[in-house]
Amino acid sequence: MIREGPVGGGTLVLAALGAAVILALPAWGGGVRSEMDSLLEADREMSRRAGVVGLGAALVDHLGPGGVVLPADGHPIVGREALKALLRELPSNESAGPSAWSPLGGGLADAGDLGYTYGRFDRSASEGEWGYYVALWRRAPSGDWVLAFSRGLLDRRVDSESPEDVNLHRPLSADEHSLVTTERAFARHSVAHGMAAAFCEYMADSGLALAGSGPPQGRAVFCEGAGEEAPGTLAWEPIFTCVSRSGDLGYNFGPYEYDIPAGDHPARAFHGYFMTVWRRQADGQWRFLIDGGNQCSAPLAMPR
């Protein structure tokens, strides 16, 4: 059953800064359509709430137990109390991020317990200044959708602390183990063959990579660059995983490091956190639908 697609089905065009990604995606069927409508409406409701009370309060209102907010710069913020504490430290005249955004599409697990939405928001009044976000949602016992993970909306640096309670320290289900194993294989492929080759290999045909600036990039961009020498080495390691009850949709997040060796410039290293949304394919293999991340100015050690 098709459970992915843009708002309204059909063809999705994401354009910014003179570039475009065009995805021809099918429309949803009737039952899935109504489920997707409820998921997209949850995203729109959070946007409307942000317009009334501000982004920070809207995120607090919608964040589920153990939910994670990934800022533009900083460690992941885990849970409502940690988010509220950080928001209290922001100067009253500074915004936490956009007060409105619009989902462009999303997808659902077959079990209906996990879904994701993605879209874009105005970063500034300047023409073309867009930001892109992705949100993971879990179905609460009440039937409402609650925010499980947000990347992109908290569009600023925050002085958050490195997460200590990572869920890979617990026993994993077979589906979770499969997804973590795939994530680690994806990372090893990147180190051995370059980021472009790894993204070409592990990205779904309809997948998107969300950059810190500029438009999302589709699989074709990475496949075209797969044979070129990579300017640096991108490595990462998952510290959190979540898979739907139906075992067909999941996501991971954790730290990454991007090392650029000395050449025309001194050697440089960049750090941050990644997040990847995965869909299990008909052949049983996982391929990612959305990849994104942030940067982290604070010290960050990769798990070994």
Image: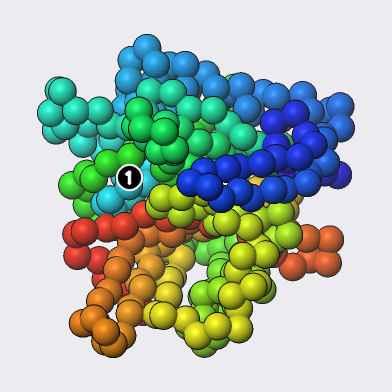
Image side of residue 39 versus residue 68, left or right: right
Q: Is residue 177 visible?
A: no
**Residue 49: x %, y % from top left:** 43, 16
Check the picture and name the quadrant holding the N terminus. top right
Residue 257 occupies quadrant = bottom left
Please state which of residues 26 and 32 is positioned toward the viewer in this rendering: 26
Specify few, some or many for label 1: CA neighbours under 10 Å numbering under 14, 14-19, or 20 or more.
many
**Residue 124: x %, y % from top left:** 34, 32
**Residue 14: x %, y % from top left:** 60, 42
Image side of residue 84 versus residue 183, left or right: left
Check the picture and name the quadrant holding the C terminus. bottom left
Residue 193 occupies quadrant = bottom right
Please state which of residues 16 and 66 is positioned toward the viewer in this rendering: 16
**Position above or below: 146 against 182:** above
Residue located 46% across and 50% down the image: 214
**Residue 253: x %, y % from top left:** 46, 58
Residue located 25% across and 66% down the image: 300
**Position above or below: 169 against 262:** above
Please state which of residues 53 and 142 is positioned toward the viewer in this rendering: 53
Image side of residue 80 versus residue 131, left or right: left
Provide the secondary structure element on which disc 1 rests.
Answer: loop
Instruction: Identify the residue position indicated by label 1 in the image.
Output: 71
Image side of residue 19 versus residue 13, left or right: left
